[in-house]
């Protein structure tokens, strides 16, 4: 009789075998159906917050696949109007970052996580900063990269440089076109440029600078020194105004450093979260 050795090992092993599956679902939050992916069985819940036009699928593949699933329960969400959280179509009212922050926190509450950490990239980093400041009793630890708390005229120049998605590299453009179709992708990118550029008209270009002193949780700021979209001064400003925060500069890192250097990024973040 032939015996499946793997089945015997699973049956006899006294050690739990961690689940590596990634589940996908939607949940009703604040009047919309928000899509999320979830993996891991750890006691430490972590929410991954994507950037502009981003989703768990497009922005966090290496984190969903490879972060420690025994230590962490990892949730990656699609903000309203992004990814599979459509409808509604994405729009950019003056409070869109605050709206995303409330949606993100309420999503985790709806999933029955009493306390959780935030990993926010780019726009998701801004959202995470606002959430950590406004909901301090719920946030365990905070990691942000590629984020900014104000918009300068130089930033507006950079944003206008990516307005026309036909000029994007095929590698960056293709997964977003596959997800959205060209028309929605192009229209939403233009609307984002207009929406975030409006902050430059405010005093000091402020997005959420005044909230940084309200962040009390341990905070880890990562910045790629070759980031073409977010100048290093933004990371240094966040570090200066969040008490006891930690700043890591990655000399070869660009805006998507968590994808390009996923193993190093995951290790650094896991060490901080432990």
Image: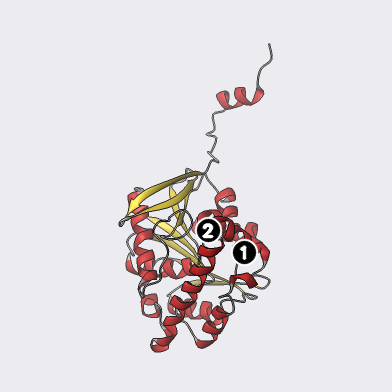
Q: Which mark is residue 180?
A: 2
User: Can you identify the residue that label 1 sits on?
Assistant: 173
Q: Residue furthest left?
A: 31
As rendered, which of 80 and 114 lies closer to the eye? 80
Vertical placement of 178 versus 159: above or below?
Answer: above
As rendered, which of 218 and 264 lies closer to the eye? 264
Q: Is residue 102 left or right of residue 125?
A: left
As rendered, which of 265 and 87 lies closer to the eye? 87
Q: Position of residue 249 (x, y in %)?
A: 60, 73
User: What secondary structure is marked by label 1?
Assistant: helix
Q: Is residue 271 visible?
A: no
User: What secondary structure is marked by label 2?
Assistant: helix
Label 2 or label 1, whichever lies nearer to me, is 2
Of the numbered discs 2 and 1, the one sitting upstream in the chain is 1
Q: Quadrant of the N terminus?
A: top right
Q: Is residue 119 visible?
A: yes
Q: Position of residue 77 (x, y in %)?
A: 45, 55
């Amino acid at each position: 009789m032939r015996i499946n050795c793997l089945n015997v090992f699973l049956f006899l092993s006294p050690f739990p075998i961690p689940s590596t599956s990634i589940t996908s679902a939607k949940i009703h939050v604040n009047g919309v159906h928000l899509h999320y992916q979830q993996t891991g069985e750890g006691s430490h819940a972590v929410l991954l917050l994507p950037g502009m036009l981003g989703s768990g699928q497009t922005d966090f593949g290496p984190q969903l696949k490879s972060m420690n699933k025994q230590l962490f329960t990892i949730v990656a969400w699609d903000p309203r109007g992004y990814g599979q959280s459509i409808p509604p179509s994405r729009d950019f009212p003056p409070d869109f970052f605050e709206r995303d922050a409330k949606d993100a926190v309420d999503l985790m509450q709806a999933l029955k996580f009493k306390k959780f950490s935030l990993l926010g990239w780019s726009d998701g980093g801004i959202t995470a900063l606002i959430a950590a400041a406004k909901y301090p009793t719920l946030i365990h630890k905070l990691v942000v990269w590629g984020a900014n708390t104000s918009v300068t005229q130089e930033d507006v120049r950079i944003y206008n440089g990516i307005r026309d998605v036909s000029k994007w590299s095929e590698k960056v453009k293709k997964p977003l076109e596959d997800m959205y179709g060209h028309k929605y992708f192009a229209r939403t990118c233009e609307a984002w440029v207009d929406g975030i550029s409006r902050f430059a008209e405010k005093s000091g270009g402020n997005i959420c600078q005044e909230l940084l002193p309200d962040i009390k949780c341990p905070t880890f700021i990562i910045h790629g020194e070759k980031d073409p979209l977010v100048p290093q001064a933004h990371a240094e400003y966040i570090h200066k105004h969040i008490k006891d925060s930690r700043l890591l500069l990655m000399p070869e890192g660009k805006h998507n450093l968590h994808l390009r250097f996923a193993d190093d990024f995951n290790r650094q973040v896991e060490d901080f979260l432990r």
